Amino acid sequence: MAPNVPKSGIWVPAVTFFNPKTGRLDLQAQKKYFTYLKSTGLAGIVVLGSNAEALLLTRDERIAITVAARQAVGPDYPLMVGVSGFSVIQVQEYIDDAKKAGADYALLLPSAYYGPATTKEVVYGFYDEVAKTTPLPIVIYNFPGVANGIDLDSVTISSLANANPGKIVGVKLTCGSVAKITRLSAEFSSEEFATFAGQADFLIGGLAVGAAGCVTGFGNIFPKTVVQIYNLYQEGKHKEALDLHRKAALAESPVKAGIASVKYAVSQYSAVAAGIEDAEAKLAPRKPYVPVNEAAKTNIKKMMEAVAGIEDSL
């Protein structure tokens, strides 16, 4: 049984593979990918995060991919599963599905479809009501870019955690705020609440002020490199960690453009390492979204070349 608070370290929100002919899930490729990620030193895997195109999947597909993840990584490997939706009842159903499929933790965005109506009181009430009934520990997911600009402050996050001990057990801060990490790590011990950076390019900044680690989409592409940055920092080799971190941050910049860029980069690097054939076709974004153009492909490979060599050496 997983501990109540997610393990410190690097977590990767895995991308989703589709059959290029049918547009449906390619679970064989997906299992290969989950198995590969497990082998790279990660603390755990996130299923159905933003990088999984979770809100483009049907409910049955969400269940199937979570079951596939548990089958691929075995009974004891930590899995965090995205359960975001637009209403309390919808989220409760997703949490129940995730629990039955083998999840250890639930990752939850604020319900923010109606942006102007999503006040602090609405956000607090949403998380508090879900927490009161959840069978899984909840990690709050703060990502204004996919939540109508809603940006949770540290006071709201800490209030929710204090009101729901053992139920709300962490946060992923894709907002990029190291200041929030500082405040939350000052208030909570790592045994009761895990504060994760939400992007790899501020990993060391987060670790320096008390982050538990990072949940990083870039880790899909070069998981061993991001794990190495974390390990070097934890071993006190701060200069080596920072040197590698700077190289990785430059390599990460072209995938800031969105999911199509991330998936193309995965198809060129980690999917190849995982032994997945025809990876580029299987990693096209789900329609209506489209793959990156040739100029973007060239730039991604140019920017990532140096870190690709480092990844291969680890």
Image: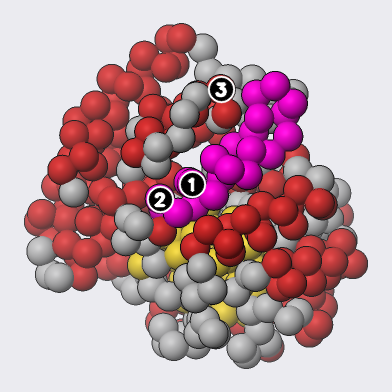
Picture coordinates of residue 101, whole percent (x, y):
70, 67
Mark 3 vs mark 1, CA separation in Å: 16 Å
What residue lies at 58% left-to-right and 64% top-to-bottom? 70
Q: In which quarter of the image is the N terminus?
A: bottom right
Name the image colouring.
secondary structure
Nearer the observer, disc 3 or disc 1?
1
Q: Is residue 89 above or below residue 130?
A: above
Q: Name the residue under label 2.
A: 36
Chain-order first, disc 3 or disc 1: 1
Question: Cβ–Cβ below 8 Å for labels 1 and 2?
Answer: yes
Q: Name the residue under label 1.
A: 32
Question: Cβ–Cβ below 8 Å for labels 3 and 1?
Answer: no
View extreme (right): residue: 89
The residue nearer to you, when weighing 259 against 129, is: 259
Q: What residue type is labelled 2?
A: Tyr
Q: Is residue 81 above or below residue 284?
A: below
Q: To which quarter of the image does residue 290 belong?
A: top right
The residue nearer to you, when weighing 210 against 212, is: 212
Residue 101: numbered disc: none
Q: Which amino acid does label 3 sit on?
A: Ala
Q: How crowded is mark 2: few (under 14 residues within 10 Å), some or many (20 or more)?
A: some
SS under mark 1: helix
The answer to whether 192 appears left or right of 290 in the picture is left
The residue nearer to you, when weighing 188 against 156, is: 188
Mark 1 vs mark 2, CA separation in Å: 6 Å
Residue 40 in view (yes/no) = yes
Residue stretch rendered in magenta on the structure: 17-37
Q: In this view, does 263 lie above or below 89?
A: above
Q: To which quarter of the image does residue 181 belong?
A: bottom left
Tell whether position 27 is magenta: yes
Q: Mark 3 points at which residue?
A: 281
